[in-house]
Image: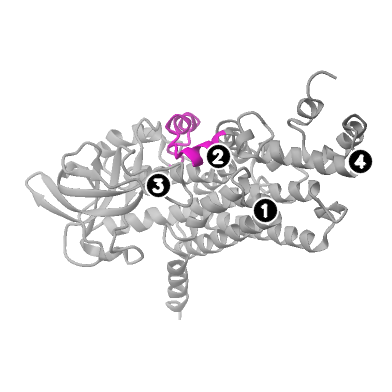
């Protein structure tokens, strides 16, 4: 047999074939079968799960064929229309071919994958729920959730930025006038230009209505002063959808302005070093006598806080969908690991405790998915309960999906703590989903307030 038989035949195998391969290779390796099994298992894990093997091994991570396996009890396409399954298939294929092979590199080198995102935009993912007359795909909130869930199996961090970009494009499309829609949306939908959402400030996070960035009207310009914190894409993106104070205190004094990169008085803080979300830069956005044309006011003065909150309702579904994709990937990674890792003379998949844990993970995933999709439909229909359902979905799915990913890491043992293994990156990337788009504590406030006002 030419070359290294292990490398040539085990390079991209599925874990379920390990036993058959052991029987074939044990004599050639001159190893006892039990030792050969462990050896094959570790080679499988190293080659098919290790980050450094992504670019060489097409079976790394979670392929679309695995995620969409019709035999899987957790497959993401159950209950979808044929058209929705096609959207989802395109997204899974893109995640498998264009994102998963580079996920580890983007994380470790902190690369903002502009070219990859523009490829995604060519598939319609730059303005998924933006209207077609300005370049958007015109899809529903449920369609959007399906797409973000699928993309996140390839890279949750990059997909999360794409979801924020989509939210910004939708806000301009929905609340901007026709001139603004024509000026901004086509470039956003093609991702020739990228957008950032600017609400949070150093002194106002959950209490967003207390923001201090001011915009004083002077002739045909607003003069902005203040700063925004934790801005995804900050410094690298091309336009900033900024919530600023044009009036008095409270929510009614807030307006929404689009500030374009290169505007005098606009600058950025240092690039933050983060636990996860490393494929997207995060910086403070600073305004120092920054002059913005009145023509960039989205909606009316005083409407900004309402615009921001309506954007976040969809943003909460989007970020929950990103958590779903990461959790789905981790369930399958954990399942595969259990079938190849041996301890005490048998694979971990024979351990009833771990079987039960895997069952709980799958159940949590499916329950989370159903809740997110219900909220997406409610928001699309403009139902009265949409805000509460979006909050419930974000709270439940981001908490449960993080628990799933964390349990998957635990199942990997020491291997799960190595950056060679995808599971740890999913854990790091979705931890922040419990914080942004409204912390999960704020989600509880919104839900309880909604319940108590019904009395």
Place of residue 195 in the rendered image (x, y in percent of width and height, measured from the top left) = 34, 41
Label for residue 210? none
- Label 2 environment density (alpha carbons within 10 Å; few <14, some 14–19, many ≥20): many
Q: Quadrant of residue 290?
A: top left
The number of discs equals 4
First in sequence: mark 2 or mark 1? Answer: 2
In this rendered view, identify the residue nearer to me: 39 or 12.
39
Mark 2 — residue? 104
First in sequence: mark 4 or mark 2? Answer: 4
> Gap between marks 4 and 1, in whole Å?
24 Å
Label for residue 167? 3
In this rendered view, identify the residue nearer to me: 254 or 435.
435
Determine the residue positioned at 56% across, 31% down.
98
> Gap between marks 2 and 3, in whole Å?
26 Å
Q: Which residues are magenta?
A: 102-129
Label for residue 414? 1
């Amino acid at each position: 047999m030419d070359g290294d038989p292990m490398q040539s035949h085990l390079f991209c195998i599925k874990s379920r074939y390990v036993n058959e391969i052991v029987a074939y290779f044990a004599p050639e390796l001159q190893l006892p079968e039990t030792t050969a099994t462990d050896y094959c298992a570790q080679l499988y894990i190293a080659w098919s799960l290790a980050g450094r093997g992504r670019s060489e091994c097409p079976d790394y991570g979670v392929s679309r064929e695995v995620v969409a396996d019709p035999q899987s009890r957790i497959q993401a396409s159950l209950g979808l229309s044929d058209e929705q399954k096609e959207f989802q298939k395109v997204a899974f294929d893109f995640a498998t071919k264009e994102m998963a092979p580079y996920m580890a590199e983007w994380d470790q080198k902190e690369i903002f994958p502009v070219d990859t995102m523009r490829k995604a935009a060519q598939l319609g993912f730059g303005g998924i729920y933006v209207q077609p007359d300005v370049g958007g795909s015109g899809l529903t909130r449920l369609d959007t959730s399906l797409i973000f869930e699928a993309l996140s199996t390839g890279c949750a961090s990059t997909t999360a930025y794409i979801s924020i970009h989509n939210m910004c494009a939708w806000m301009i499309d929905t609340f901007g006038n026709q001139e603004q829609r024509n000026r901004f949306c086509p470039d956003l939908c093609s991702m020739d230009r990228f957008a950032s959402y600017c609400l949070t400030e150093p002194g106002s996070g959950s209490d967003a209505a207390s923001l201090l960035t001011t915009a004083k009207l002077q002739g045909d310009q607003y003069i902005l002063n203040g700063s925004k914190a934790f801005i995804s894409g900050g410094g690298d993106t091309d336009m900033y959808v900024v919530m600023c104070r044009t009036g008095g205190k409270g929510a009614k004094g807030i307006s929404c302005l689009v500030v374009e990169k290169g505007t005098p008085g606009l600058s950025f803080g240092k690039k933050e070093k983060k636990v996860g979300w490393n494929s997207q830069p995060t910086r403070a956005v600073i305004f120092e006598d920054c002059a913005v044309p009145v023509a960039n006011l989205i909606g009316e003065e005083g409407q900004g806080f309402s615009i921001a909150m309506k954007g976040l309702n969809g943003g909460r579904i989007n970020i929950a969908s990103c958590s779903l994709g990461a959790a789905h990937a981790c369930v399958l990674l954990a399942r595969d690991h259990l079938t190849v890792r041996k301890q005490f003379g048998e694979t971990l998949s024979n351990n009833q405790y771990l079987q039960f844990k895997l069952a709980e993970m799958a159940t949590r995933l499916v329950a989370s998915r159903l809740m997110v999709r219900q909220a997406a439909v409610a928001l699309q229909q403009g139902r009265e309960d949409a805000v509460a359902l979006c909050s419930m979905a974000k709270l439940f799915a981001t908490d449960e999906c993080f628990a799933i990913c964390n349990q998957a890491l635990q199942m990997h043992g020491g291997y799960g703590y190595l950056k060679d293994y995808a599971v740890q990156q999913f854990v790091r990337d979705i931890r922040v989903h419990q914080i942004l788009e409204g912390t999960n504590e704020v989600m509880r406030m919104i839900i309880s307030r909604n319940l108590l006002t019904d009395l």
